[in-house]
Amino acid sequence: MTPSPAGLIITRCTVLTHDDHEGIGFAEDAAIVVRGGVVEAVVSSAEAEGLSAAERIDARGQVALPGLINCHTHAPMVALRGVAEDLPTEEWFNDVVWPVESNLTVKDVESGARLACAEMIRGGVTCFADHYFSMDAVAAVVEECGMRAHLGEAYFSSQGPQGRERSLEFALRHRGGAGGRITTALAPHAPYTVDDADLAATAELAREHGLPVHLHAAENRDQADTGLARHGVTPIEVLRRTGILDTDVLIAHGTGILDRDLPVLAGASGRIAVATAPRGYLKFAWPTTTPVRALHDIGVPVGLATDGAASNNSLDVWESMALTALVQKSTTGDPRWLTSRQALHHATLQSARAVGLGDAIGSIAPGRRADIILVDLTGPHTQPVHDLAATLVHSARSSDVRTTIVDGRVLMRDRELLTIDVPAVVRELEERMPALLDRSHGKRIQDYKT
């Protein structure tokens, strides 16, 4: 009996591989066979020649990587890219961002999310963890454009119990949505905007419904120092006493994680992960960065992120990968940490684990979802190639991504977006800018006080 054709075969590429010890390797002149949205096999190009497929991609000169994952962002905030520049954190929130966000409509969130997804697809991001408002609109955009996403409806205690209830309702309603491409989380904003009672209630709901939690915590050193001075506990210790660390939790930033927090995280009964977005920390001139090495030593995966484009100006996870490696070398004083291969591991398997999808994505191997990007290394800035890992991390750019595939579906082919009309989205946002940026009302959605 003749086997049915594969859905997609990618041939003549170099494939990034992971070994049993989580080492990074490369299989040359390889082919990837995809069937039903899943990687069926990675074989030699010669072996793939006799196989039939509904679609074939000749990827000679290109490297196939697992799709990149943006482990913490606020996708609709691309609409605010560049509106709050060169400001300290408190002024950034209170004087610009939170007043502007009080103007947001559902349509603004939808348009921003659509533009963000276009940017991420073009940059080789196939999955993102989003933490924002009006998330039904973001979920609709994800279903429409074909990306994978881990979504949470953010809330503050100032919203009353309704905020927490909306976060739960969203998570239950959209869990498993978009044909399984959407996973969900409960999304309290942070320990400084969500009180202990709400955090404890969130932890209880997470355990009752089998949901993870995604929140900001110990974002910077000021928050840790303020917590100790006022209450005798760090933000991480607040998460322990409220039960959040007994759930599966994704902690955004963590540049204020102190040495005393490490045993707390190591002893947590939940699955703990941290997302790092180094460009924003450099822009805000924070004195510390995510302690990636210390977290590695206690077994906490660190995924790569961008945060929102209002602080980071970009949703370029490629840049986050390079900056993470460089900042870690600088802060540890050790050029051997992070290596390029370690940076690629953070960008792939560790990022997949951070968003709770470590068994489904993050590597190109049989049984994994076919979230794959093809990177062209024929440009002058990537030649010659002496060390392929170093070329990918420190020489290649997001614009070298030629093709982006999610669940075996091609979302971008040869730099052409297939599921999003960018000029139409830009026109929509331009029409909204005067009303969106108006701060004359003097309102804020929240106050920033560490």
Image (cartoon, rainbow, N blue to C red):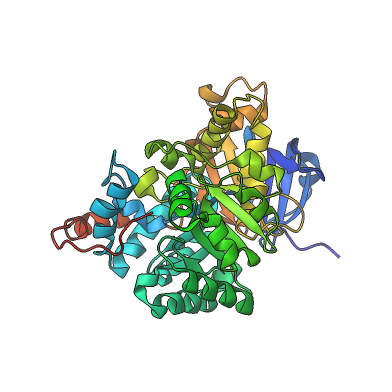
Q: Relative to the observer, which residue lies in front, 39 or 202? A: 202
- Residue 266 visible here: yes
**How far across and how far down the image is residue 252, in percent?**
51, 53
Q: Where is residue 89 drawn, in percent x and y?
A: 34, 46
Q: Quadrant of residue 87?
A: top left
Q: On screen, 382 above or below 196?
A: above
Image quadrant in which you'd find residue 62: top right
User: Is 135 left or right of 424, judged from the image as shown?
Assistant: right
Residue at left 28%, top 41%?
A: 85
Question: Between 82 and 382, which is closer to the camera in this rendering?
Answer: 82
Is residue 143 visible in the rendered image? The answer is no
Q: Nearer the viewer, residue 419 or 4?
A: 419
x 48%, y 79%: residue:
169
- Identify whether 299 is placed above or below 287: below
Q: Identify whether 372 is placed above or below 435.
A: above
Residue 377, percent from left and from top: 58, 30
Q: Is residue 79 above or below residue 206?
A: above
The residue that appears at 58% across and 41% down in the rendered structure is 291
